Image: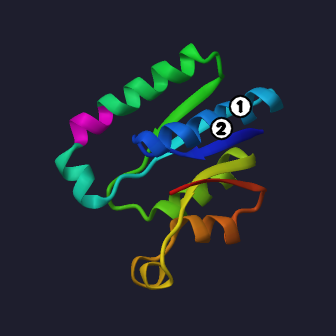
Amino acid sequence: MSVVVGYVPSREGAVVLERAIEEARSRGTRLVALNVPRAAEFAQDFVADAQDLQHLDEALAAAGVEHEVRRGSGQDIPADTLLDLVEEVGAELVVIGLRRRSPVGKMIMGSTSQRVLLDAPCPVLAVQFD
């Protein structure tokens, strides 16, 4: 079993990651971190993102957590990729970030978090930030 975390290299992502590390430690299980960049970010910032993920791997190793870091392609739909990973590794928990958005913002932009909350086959821990 594993804890899966949707990771974004940002201040908010660091908060979500820390909570996922706590959960993996308390459950005595492996942590699988997934980053799925948007298509524009994937093309423009591939080197920067690769460095961010290298730092992520190093941080998880320093935290003493058995872990794996994965990266989706810029063509992937983040919710689909995360949910597929949850199934693949038999996750016992998914940890995601959740921020407030207006109803119109949700309608226009969609909501990865909402999709994961509704479709995950295991419990989801939503870490809220503004």
Quadrant into which the N terminus falls:
top right
Distance, label 2 to label 1, CA atoms, is 5 Å
At horizontal 61% and vertical 27% (from top left) the residue drawn is: 67
Query: Residue 113 lies in what quarter of the image?
Result: bottom right
Q: Is residue 44 above or below residue 14?
A: below
Q: Residue 110 got which mark?
A: none
Magenta part mainly helix, strand or loop? helix
Which amino acid, mark 1? Glu
Q: 83 left or right of 23?
A: left
For this orientation, the residue located farthest to the right is 27
What is the crowding at mark 1: few (fewer than 14 residues within 10 Å), some, or many (at least 20)?
Answer: some
x and y percentages locating residue 103 in the rendered image: 50, 83
Q: Do the CB atoms of the residues marked 2 and 1 lie less than 8 Å apart?
A: yes
For this orientation, the residue located farthest to the front is 130
Secondary structure of residue under mark 1: helix
Q: 44 left or right of 88?
A: left
Which segment did they paint magenta?
Answer: 46-50
For label 1, the residue is 22
For label 2, the residue is 19
For the image, the number of numbered tags is 2
Residue 100 within the magenta-colored segment of the rendering: no
Secondary structure of residue under mark 2: helix
What is the crowding at mark 2: few (fewer than 14 residues within 10 Å), some, or many (at least 20)?
Answer: some
Frontmost residue, 40 versus 17: 17
